[in-house]
Image: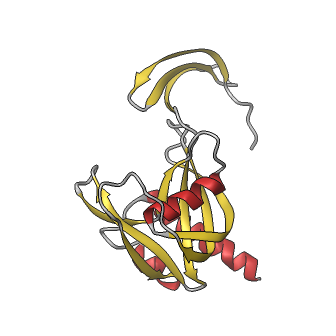
Amino acid sequence: MTRRLPTIHGITEHDAGPYRMERLDLEFSNGERRQFERLRGRGHGAVAVVPLLDENTVLLVREYAAGLHRYELGLVKGRIDAGETPVQAADRELKEEAGYGARRLDVVRLLSLAPVYMSHETTVVLARDLYPERLPGDEPEELEVVPWPLADIGELALREDFSEGRSIAALFAARQYLERERA
């Protein structure tokens, strides 16, 4: 079923930390009027990098997660800086967080965090043909790099210390991307 998008009759906004909170006055195709709130990011988006050390091994990083006050395994990720493409940001973040550059970087897809109330999107980038190269990053401590068998990402998704949704979704999307490529 294809529906016409709601009509926006007005938008009011205010600051909400690194985001802008917007209240939309909407009218749906059936005549219903409602107000919805959404968070709009102030940056240029983010990247999640799936770095393949070889065709069977993905590199994860273990870093402090302040929201949960514990160390978490996850993918290399970060903000896209002004003037950067997602591929450039992915290569920079990979060098900063894992100590590798990539000769081949492919965009897999976009992921949204919570599309019902957030505009933020993360570009998933598959990084291959890695080589050692480190750039200084903004992390307070060096991140532990953890090789993980790509065939075992189902087990990884069940670990308590691997809970970030973007990392889980990005790994499964990248695995599917690779399977299509090999077919």
**Front in this rendered view, residue 183 or 24:** 183
* Image coords of residue 3 (percent x, y): 73, 35
Q: Nearer the viewer, residue 120 or 38?
A: 120
Residue placed most toward the observer, 106 or 34: 106
Question: Where 45 falls versus 14 (above or below)?
Answer: below
The image shows residue 114 at horizontal and vertical percentages of 49, 44
- 148 left or right, relative to 7: left
Q: At x 61% / y 70%, what residue is drawn?
A: 102
Left or right placement of residue 131 versus residue 107 in this view: left
Question: On screen, 2 above or below 60?
Answer: above
- Can residue 110 be seen? no
- Does 118 appear above or below 71? above
Q: Position of residue 66 (x, y in %)?
A: 27, 51
The residue depicted at 39 percent of the width and 51 percent of the height is 138
The quarter of the rendered structure image containing the C terminus is bottom right
Q: Residue furthest left?
A: 69
